[in-house]
Image: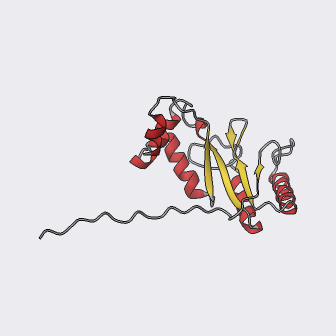
Amino acid sequence: TEPVETMPEPEPVSFNAPAEMRGAFLLPGEDFLSTKDTSEAALRAEVDKSFAGAKKLEINSVIVGTSFEDKVIYQTKDAPELSSDFDLLRYITDKAREEGFYTYAIFDASLYESRQSVAAALMAVGAGSSSKLTQNLREFAERYALDGILIDGYQNQGAQSSYSDYIK
């Protein structure tokens, strides 16, 4: 008899999330970068104040906005950086870990592709795509200790099959 080929068991997908999420947004222009003083010391102070306020409210998760005036607070190869001297997202993620927060970040894909072509570029990630978007998203995911990434800045093309194509 010939050996029977069996399919491997699918690996379980796990998410790093609290049992009960009590989250808040941490947004540039509101919680940090809210004054004209953009020195490293001022930015650290604003972030520290935001985390202290979140702790008082018993928040356990932060969702960090990473884009501000078409610039970003992180560093990747092609990112339109707000500052190359101070990695603000690194400071925020380190502070979040130190304070015991789950940390999620919003990645604006439209900074790397047109809103219409982002969905196709994202679907090609698993196929080894090397577009500017996928390279920067991959680097972003590898560089920062995040519990999750929310992708913003794209639109679905509205074809009847677009969602089913996406979930394949």
Rendered location of residue 14, percent (x, y): 54, 63
Residue 86 visible in image: no
Which quarter of the figure has residue 153?
A: top right
- Residue that appears at 71% across and 66% down: 97
- Residue that appears at 86% across and 45% down: 37
Question: Is residue 26 shown above or below 162?
Answer: below
Question: Is residue 137 shown above or below 91?
Answer: above
Residue 135 visible in image: yes
Please give left or right for residue 157 compared with residue 27 in the image: left
Rendered location of residue 19, percent (x, y): 68, 65
Which residue is more in the foreground, 123 or 95?
123
Rendered location of residue 90, percent (x, y): 69, 57
Rendered location of residue 167, percent (x, y): 46, 45
- Residue that appears at 58% across and 52% down: 140
Which color scheme did the rendering employ for the protein? secondary structure
Which residue is more in the foreground, 73 or 156?
156
Question: Is residue 47 shown above or below 134?
Answer: below
Q: Quadrant of the N terminus?
A: bottom left
Which residue is more in the foreground, 162 or 49?
162
Question: Is residue 26 shown above or below 132?
Answer: below
